[in-house]
Image (cartoon, rainbow, N blue to C red):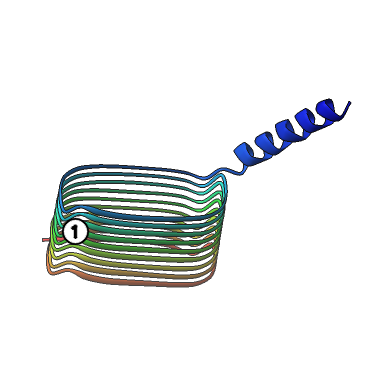
Amino acid sequence: MKKVILSISAMLLSVVGFAQANVSNVDQWGALNGALVVQVGNENDSDVFQLGVLNISVVAQDGGFNEADTDQIGLLNISTVSQEGNGNQAYVGQLGAFNFASTSQIGESNNAATIQLGALNTASTIQEGNDNNALTVQVLAGNNSEISQEGEFNGAAVFQLGFANDALTVQNGTGNISGTIQLGFLNEAQTWQTGESNAALTIQLGDSHSSVISQNGYANGAIVFQSN
């Protein structure tokens, strides 16, 4: 009987230990690449792939069931991902040189993806709350994007193709949606949303355009199209 009890106890401990295990995979090809992964909690998952020289990836996960995937190919790309809470998902893909991406998630079930193809692009995503979604895509060089979301069910997307474009998106509230498309160079777009169910779209084609959208309240809608 004693042996049976010990066997059952061992099995339960094994199951509990397996259920709470964090998982980290780091795959490095090249020279002088660096990766730091810190996981505290249960069932967190991190995957880092680096191909090239001097790429740097930092992942910090505190909570449960968070997932972070980082792919870096090229020279001196830098990525940082910080997740605090449960069920957050983050992806960073960098192909090129001297790109920088920062993702910070605090809450539950937030999703963020950053894709950088080129050089000297900078992207920052900050999510505080639950069920927020953010996407940043940068192609060519010197583009900058900042997305800040505080609340629930907000969605933001930024697509930049060109050189030295700048986009700022700030959302506070619930269910706000923002989209920014910049094709060209030296364009600047800002979107500020406070409240609920506001929607904004900015499209800039060409160079040196400037746009600011500020929405406060409920279910406001704005579209800005600029071309030259």
Residue 157 shows in this picture:
no
Residue at point 63%, 41% (across, down): 17
Q: Quadrant of residue 40?
A: bottom right
Residue type pointed to by label 1: Asn
Q: Nearer the viewer, residue 157 or 120?
A: 120
Q: In the image, what residue occupies the spot 18% across and 62% down?
A: 143
In the rendered image, residue 100, in percent from the top left (x then y), is placed at 23, 61
114 left or right of 15 in image: left
Q: Which residue is mark 1?
A: 99
Q: Residue at x 83, y 26 (%)?
A: 4
Camera-side residue of 222 and 86: 86
Q: Can you say which quadrant of the picture contains the N terminus? A: top right
Image height of 135 relative to 168, above or below: above
Work out which residue is located at the far front of the displayed protein and give it. Answer: 2
Decide if residue 16 is on the left or right side of residue 171.
right
Quadrant of the drawing holding the C terminus? bottom left
Mark 1 surroundings within 10 Å by alpha-carbon count, few (fewer than 14), some (14 through 19), many (20 or more): many
Tally the marks. Answer: 1
Please tell me whether mark 1 sits on a helix, a strand or a loop. Answer: loop
Q: Quadrant of residue 125?
A: bottom left
Residue 147 image point, x, y percent: 37, 64
In front here: 142 or 219? 142
Q: Is residue 210 above or below residue 113?
A: below
**Residue 228 seen:** yes
Residue 107 position within the rendered picture, expressed as x and y whole percent measured from the top left: 57, 60
> Where does residue 200 sit, x and y in percent of width and height?
40, 60
Above or below 140: residue 224: below
Residue drawn at point x = 18 percent, y = 64 percent: 165
